[in-house]
Image (cartoon, rainbow, N blue to C red):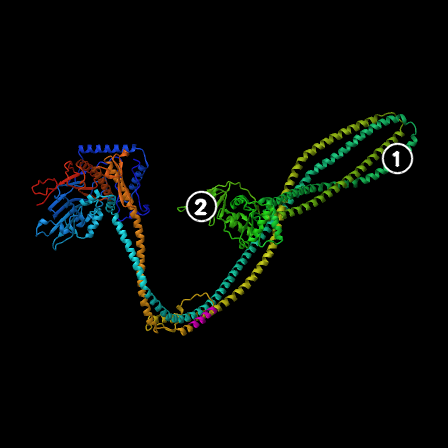
């Protein structure tokens, strides 16, 4: 039925923003029923449980099936906004803040607050009557005048209601039975309640039942309440205990919903919407709370008015107190001025002492500084002496090393000499064989020429045999002359041959001696040249790796241009402060830590951090920005940053890296403080650690404990590691890993200046050695060439002489042969010549064979020579290394010797300075002691002045307090008292203190001259002032208390009204839900429409929940039975929201016709029996014979008013 539900109207905000759990009277909602009902066990009148019989079980099952059908119909109905609102309201009720309080929870039989018995004596029409009720449904019926309502009145009166609330009498005495006669002393009513379960009231005192007995006395007897325990023993007569019990059990007899008498029932059934709303507010106690809040508001207004009147009435007293205070202050001012003068004098003494103390402290600081400097100089001297001793030890070690290297060099030279001698020994057989081969070759040449000559002679002889027939005599003369000349020439040549041969041998020996030396020296030159090229290459490599090599790699050509312009303006002195850039130019990698260079540059920050220029003031910053624009720098090119001028003076101190790791500050270095400090400020390079790997970084720096992860190492915040530049950090006890997505590059160079310097020194030394070696090699080559030239020349001369001798001998032999032939008869025989030719041929063959044999012998000797030459080369290389080490050690020793001289001089200078410092320190100490003595004298005077000030101040206090007679402080201080006075620190000089004394003395004199007071006695003025002040302070405290109470009341009232509105909305929603549930028993549905602004309560009913056309907003359009049932449903809904343990309805069916009454009664019984956690008492004059008595339903029938009437009612009992 989408059009049925309407939103409840609220005149004020219903937001649930208060703490509803703190409500004074928390009421829980009725539990929304969903699905089937739980199966319950039942109890008989004696309280014993029993299981329902088959008929009752079947009846329950039928009811459950009907209910399930209804649920299926509701589920089959289309969803609508109204149904969603209903579901939301049910959810709100389920989540109600009052759901935790459940007196007699649903689904469980009632245990506390249920009426077990009502007993009356001499009350209204009953002499004695006892009614024992069951725990669930009770009907009391009878004719008018039978005393039905008297039972209700007894219940109300016994549980705290007044006589007027019963609508039967104006006072309690009118309720006493009139027929009792004159001897009647009064009436008595007693109500016995169950007191079981967790919600029972003091069960340890009252037990499982508690009885409330009220006596109504007509005379002087007891007129009041009694609380009895389960055994009938009286436990209390206090109304307060009764109220506490009623509050604990949630019994509200004056609530029309809990106890609905005839008047309230008629008014509710026939009332208008406003009457129903008033009934609702009264039943839910909203009306009472509203009245309480209105009374609180009136109280607040009264309190504010009282506070205003009190403030206005207090003004004269305040004015009088002010005047008295002025007079008292005038007296105090004079005494205070006198005390101030004494205090100023004391402060003057303390100022003198403070000044002297500062001088002493300054001398102490200077003395301490001198002492520290002296200790520092002594430490430096000790260090220098230790260094000197260390260098002495090092010098001795170097000398020993030089001696060892010299011996090794001598040994190597001796080895080389021995090997060269062995080489010469091995070369001698070869040279002998080569000389023999040379001789053989010469002989071979001679043999060849002799062979040719023999052939020519044979041919000539044969020709001459024919031609030589004539001129024999002339030929003989010529021949004789020729023979003589040749013999003379031959003698001369033979005399020259021996010196020439000696010269040839000597020149050959010189050549053979110089040739190995020249070859060795040439090898040494080549080795030195290779060494020179290696050192030169190393210098070029170091220069290329040096940090200051190239500016362009930090920011490209634009950076180079900007750097050039900055340098130009610096030379022109256009900058006001220091300017550097790019920053990377001044940063270098520490030598030996090159492997961390890329990682350190990654830790500095994104690319572009090292191309920045840094200035120290705003003007230079603007000038550099202009230069950037001139060279065309982009937004990210060569940015400019500003740093404090203090950062230019010196480099920041950075902590040493943690053990086992490096930091950026330990890997990089810089001589420029400005660049270094800029990277620390902007890049936090002192907070970044560098490691070889992730595992190494975690092992060295990660700390994990119960507080989470953290980094070991003081200032370290980030840890970078190889190989990719990733890093991790910790925040809030959690470790965070950050990957590096940029390629690691190195633009910062290594600091190679020292290495370059040493390499250049090595290069110069090698160059000098190479020069010497080349000069020596050239000298040996020239000498070798000269020896070879001389050997060749002497060899040619020897050859020439031998040739001349041979030629002369041949010619002489020929001439002699011719002479012999000429003397003998001529024969034509050529046999000798032919034999001579054959001999020459044999001689040539023999020479060739001898030469081949000599060549074979020479080749067999050469491997030993080559092996020995290789040994010589190896020894020469070792000798060269030893010589290099020897030269290096000599240079180092030379440096140490020079350094030792310098260090010795430094030690002597340090000793002289220490002597001077010691004399100065001694003088400072003497001066300090003198100043301390003067300070002690001044301190003694200051303490005496302070004692005088204390004496005057305390005497004045005693005088003002009226205790001058008891003042016992001595005027003259003892030495102990003087020593106990604490030192007073002042922050001004003695001159200022003296001016202060003069000022205060002048003020005191002026004040005395101006004094004009009405009261001459300071004590009287003080008494009047303090009495007036006490009165005013007391009144002001009262006003402040009232003001605080008003503010608290306002705040509390605001909170309570807010919760009251929330409570009203909550009760309205609960009532609406309960009303719809009760109507659903008749397959109808409905809604309660609340208009809180107008104070109206209207009912909307749809007789058939599946037929929207049966909906009506006018309850008068319903039949009498439907209207009464609707009204009863509303009553039950309102009552269920209150959680009262029992409900009483008197004449609820007065306007129902018989058919409707029967139907309503059956429905009422059905609903009531389902609510086994509540007790219902229905009082009606109508017939209830249609109802059947069960353990959950009990019927009491009152006897007729006439005595002759038959007394029915199974459970009624009238005591005679």
Residue under pointer 1: 482
Q: Residues within 10 Å of mark 1 (few under 14, many from 20)?
A: some
Front residue of 446 and 343: 343
Q: Main secondary structure of the magenta part?
A: helix
In the image, is residue 955 part of the stretch drawn in magenta?
no
Instruction: Quarter of the image for the N terminus: give it.
Output: top left
Front residue of 963 and 945: 963
Residue at the (73%, 43%) spot, across then down: 782
Question: Residue 347: in sight, yes or no?
Answer: yes
Is 1092 positioned to the left or the right of 1182 in the image? right
Among the 4 quarters of the image, the one containing residue 1017? bottom left
Whether residues under marks 2 and 1 lie with C-beta atoms below 8 angstroms apart, the answer is no
Element carrying mark 1 = helix
Q: Earlier in the sequence, mark 2 or mark 1?
A: 1
Question: Residue 940: in sight, yes or no?
Answer: no
Separation of marks 2 and 1 at Cα, in angstroms: 123 Å
Pick out the residue farthest to the left.
1204
Element carrying mark 2 = strand
In the image, is residue 995 part of the stretch drawn in magenta?
yes
- Give the vertical position of 1188 relative to 562 (above or below): above
Residue under pointer 2: 730
Image location (x, y in percent) of residue 846: 75, 29
Image location (x, y in percent) of residue 663: 50, 47
Residue at the (68%, 46%) spot, across then down: 771
- Give the vertical position of 893 relative to 495 (above or below): below
Q: Residues within 10 Å of mark 2 (few under 14, many from 20)?
A: some
Among the 4 quarters of the image, the one containing residue 95? top left
Front residue of 326 and 767: 326
Image location (x, y in percent) of residue 947: 40, 70
> Which portion, as a residue range, is magenta?
991-1003
């Amino acid at each position: 039925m989408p059009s049925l539900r309407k939103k409840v109207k609220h005149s004020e905000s219903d937001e649930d923003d208060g703490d509803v759990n703190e409500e004074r009277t928390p009421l829980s909602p009725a539990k929304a029923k969903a699905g089937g009902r739980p199966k319950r066990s039942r109890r008989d009148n004696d309280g014993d449980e029993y299981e329902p019989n088959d008929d009752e079980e079947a009846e329950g099952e039928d009811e459950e099936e009907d209910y399930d059908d209804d649920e299926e119909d509701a589920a089959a109905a289309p969803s609508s906004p109204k149904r969603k609102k209903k579901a939301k309201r049910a959810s709100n009720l389920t989540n109600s803040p009052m759901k935790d309080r459940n007196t007699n929870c649903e689904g469980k039989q009632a245990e506390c607050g249920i009426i077990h018995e009502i007993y009356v004596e001499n009350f209204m029409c009953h002499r004695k009557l006892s009614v024992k009720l069951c725990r669930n449904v009770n009907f009391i019926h009878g004719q008018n005048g039978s005393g039905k309502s008297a039972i209700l009145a007894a219940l109300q009166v016994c549980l705290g209601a007044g006589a007027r609330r019963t609508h039967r009498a104006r006072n309690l005495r009118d309720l006493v039975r009139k027929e009792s006669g004159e001897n009647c002393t009064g009436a008595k009513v007693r109500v016995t309640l169950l007191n079981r379960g967790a919600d029972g009231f003091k069960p340890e005192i009252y037990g499982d039942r508690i009885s409330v007995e009220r006596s109504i006395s007509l005379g002087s007897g007891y007129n009041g309440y009694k609380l009895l325990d389960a055994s009938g023993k009286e436990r209390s007569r206090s109304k307060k205990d009764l109220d506490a019990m009623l509050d604990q059990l949630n019994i509200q007899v004056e609530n029309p919903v809990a106890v609905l008498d005839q008047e309230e029932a008629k008014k509710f059934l026939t009332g208008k919407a406003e009457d129903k709303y008033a009934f609702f507010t009264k039943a839910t106690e909203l009306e009472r709370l509203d009245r309480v809040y209105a009374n609180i508001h009136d109280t607040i207004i009264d309190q504010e008015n009282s506070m205003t009147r009190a403030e206005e009435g207090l003004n004269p007293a305040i004015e009088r107190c002010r005047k008295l205070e002025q007079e008292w202050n005038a007296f105090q001012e004079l005494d205070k001025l006198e005390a101030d003068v004494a205090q100023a004098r004391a402060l003057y003494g303390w100022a003198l002492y403070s000044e002297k103390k500062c001088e002493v402290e300054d001398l102490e600081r200077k003395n301490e500084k001198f002492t520290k400097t002296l200790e520092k100089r002594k430490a430096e001297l000790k260090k220098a002496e230790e260094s000197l001793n260390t260098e002495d030890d090092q010098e001795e070690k170097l000398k020993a090393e030089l001696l060892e290297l010299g011996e090794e060099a001598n040994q190597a030279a001796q080895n080389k000499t021995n090997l060269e001698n062995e080489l010469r020994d091995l070369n001698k057989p070869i040279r002998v064989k080569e000389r023999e081969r040379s001789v053989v070759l010469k002989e071979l040449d001679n043999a060849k020429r002799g062979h040719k000559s023999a052939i020519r002679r044979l041919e000539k002889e044969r020709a001459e045999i024919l031609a030589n027939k004539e001129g024999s005599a002339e030929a003989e003369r010529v021949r004789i002359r020729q023979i003589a000349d040749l013999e003379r020439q031959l003698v001369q040549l033979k005399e020259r041959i021996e010196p020439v041969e000696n010269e040839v041998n000597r020149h050959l020996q010189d050549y053979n001696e110089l040739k190995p030396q020249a070859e060795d020296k040439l090898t040494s030159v080549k080795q030195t040249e290779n060494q020179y090229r290696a050192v030169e290459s190393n210098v070029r490599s170091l220069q290329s790796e040096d940090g200051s090599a190239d500016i362009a790699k930090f920011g490209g050509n634009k950076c180079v241009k900007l750097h050039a312009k900055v340098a130009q303006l610096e030379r022109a002195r256009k900058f006001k402060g220091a300017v550097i850039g790019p920053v990377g130019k001044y940063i270098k990698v520490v030598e030996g830590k090159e492997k961390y260079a890329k990682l350190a540059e990654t830790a500095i920050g994104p690319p572009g951090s090292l191309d920045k220029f840094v200035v120290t003031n705003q003007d230079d910053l603007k000038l550099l920005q202009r230069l950037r624009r001139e060279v065309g720098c982009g937004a990210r090119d060569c940015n400019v940053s500003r740093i404090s001028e203090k950062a230019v003076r010196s480099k920041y101190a950075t902590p040493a890296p943690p053990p086992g790791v490096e930091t950026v500050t330990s890997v990089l270095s810089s001589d420029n403080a400005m660049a270094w400090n800029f990277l620390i400020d902007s890049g936090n390079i002192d907070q970044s650690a560098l490691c070889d790997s992730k595992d190494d970084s975690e092992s060295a720096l990660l700390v994990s404990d119960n507080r989470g992860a953290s980094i070991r190492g003081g200032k370290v915040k980030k840890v970078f590691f190889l190989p990719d530049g990733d890093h991790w950090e910790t925040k809030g006890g959690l470790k965070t890993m950050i990957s590096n997505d940029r390629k690691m590059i190195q633009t910062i160079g290594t600091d190679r200046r020292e290495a370059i310097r040493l390499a250049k020194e090595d290069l110069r030394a090698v160059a000098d050695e190479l020069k010497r070696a080349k000069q020596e090699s050239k000298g040996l080559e020239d000498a070798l060439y000269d020896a070879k030239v001389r050997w060749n020349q002497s060899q040619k001369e020897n050859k020439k002489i031998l040739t001349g001798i041979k030629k002369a001998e041949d010619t002489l032999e020929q001439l002699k042969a011719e002479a012999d032939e000429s003397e003998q008869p001529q024969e034509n025989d050529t046999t000798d010549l032919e034999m001579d030719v054959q001999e020459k041929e044999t001689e040539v063959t023999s020479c060739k064979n001898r030469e081949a044999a000599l060549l074979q012998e020479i080749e067999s000797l050469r491997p030993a020579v080559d092996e020995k030459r290789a040994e010589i080369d190896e020894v020469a290389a070792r000798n060269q290394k030893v010589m290099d080490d020897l030269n290096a050690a000599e240079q180092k020793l030379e440096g140490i010797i020079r350094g030792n001289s310098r260090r010795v001089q430094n030690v002597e200078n340090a000793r002289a300075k220490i002597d001077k410092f010691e004399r100065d320190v001694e003088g400072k100490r003497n001066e300090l002691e003198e100043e301390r003595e003067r300070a002690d004298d001044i301190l003694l005077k200051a303490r005496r002045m302070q004692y005088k000030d204390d004496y005057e101040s305390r005497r004045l206090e005693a005088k003002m307090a009226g205790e001058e007679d008891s003042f016992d402080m001595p005027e003259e201080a003892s030495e102990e008292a003087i020593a106990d006075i604490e030192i007073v620190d002042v922050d001004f000089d003695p001159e200022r203190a003296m001016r202060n004394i003069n000022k205060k003395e002048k003020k005191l004199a002026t004040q005395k001259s101006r004094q004009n007071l009405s009261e001459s006695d300071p004590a009287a003025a003080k008494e009047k002032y303090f009495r007036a002040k006490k009165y005013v302070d007391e009144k002001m405290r009262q006003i402040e208390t009232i003001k605080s109470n008003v503010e608290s009341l306002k705040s509390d009232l605001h909170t309570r009204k807010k919760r009251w509105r929330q409570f009203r909305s909550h009760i309205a929603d609960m009532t609406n839900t309960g009303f719809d549930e009760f109507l659903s028993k008749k397959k109808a549905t409905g809604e309660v429409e609340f208009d809180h602004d107008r104070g109206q309560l209207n009912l909307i009913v749809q007789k058939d929940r599946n037929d929207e056309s049966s909906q009506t907003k006018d309850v008068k359009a319903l039949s009498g039975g439907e209207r009464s049932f609707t009204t009863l449903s509303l009553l039950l809904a309102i009552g269920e929201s209150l959680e009262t343990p029992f409900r009483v309805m008197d004449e609820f069916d007065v306007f129902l016709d018989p058919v409707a009454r029967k139907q309503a009664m059956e429905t009422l019984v059905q609903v009531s029996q389902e609510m086994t956690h509540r007790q219902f008492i229905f009082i009606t004059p109508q017939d209830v014979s249609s109802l059947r008595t069960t353990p959950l339903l009990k019927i009491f029938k009152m006897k007729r008013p006439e005595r002759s009437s038959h007394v029915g009612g199974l459970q009624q009992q009238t005591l005679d």
